[in-house]
Image (cartoon, rainbow, N blue to C red):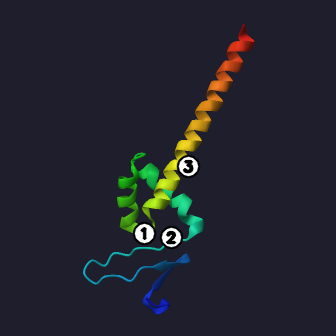
Amino acid sequence: MDIRDYQYRKSGEEKLIAPMKEDNGEIKYYVCYDDLLTILEETHVAVGNGGKTRMLKECNCRYKNITVKAIMTYKAMLTLSKETEDIEKRQCHQAVYFTAK
C-alpha cells in the first residue's frame, strides 16, 4: 500500500483512518503510540475489566492497528501494578500491627 491509499480526517485534530469499505461505511482510526495507553485504559473500563478477547473485539470496532500483543502488555502491566499495590498494603498493615503493640 502506498501512503496515497490512506485517508485522514480532520475533526479538531488530524487522524489517519484506514481505507473505508464501501459496503459498511465504518471508519477505523489508526492509533498513534502516544494515545495507545489512554485508549487501552478507556476500553478496559468500558468492557467492565474484561479479558483480552473482549478488549480486542471492542478495540477492533473503532481502531485498525491495536494488536493482541499491545493488549497483553497492558494487562501484564495491570497485573504487576496490582501485585505491587498488594505488597505495599501488606507492608503497611504489618507496620500498623507492630506499632500498635
Question: Which label sits on residue 63?
Answer: 1
State which quarter of the image contains the N terminus: bottom left
Which amino acid is tagged 2? Answer: Val
Cα distance in 3D space between marks 3 and 2: 19 Å
* Sequence order check, earlier mark of 2 and 1: 2
Question: Residue 63: where, in percent of width, then height?
Answer: 42, 69
Mark 1 nearby-residue class (10 Å; few <14, some 14–19, many ≥20): some
Which amino acid is tagged 3? Answer: Met
Question: Residue 11: where, in percent of width, then height?
Answer: 51, 77
Q: Which image quadrant for residue 26?
A: bottom left
* Sequence order check, earlier mark of 3 and 1: 1
Residue annotated with mark 3: 77
Question: Residue 75: where, in percent of width, then height?
Answer: 49, 50
Mark 3 nearby-residue class (10 Å; few <14, some 14–19, many ≥20): few
Q: Residue at x 42, y 52 (%)?
A: 46
- Contact (Cβ within 8 Å) of mark 3 with mark 2: no
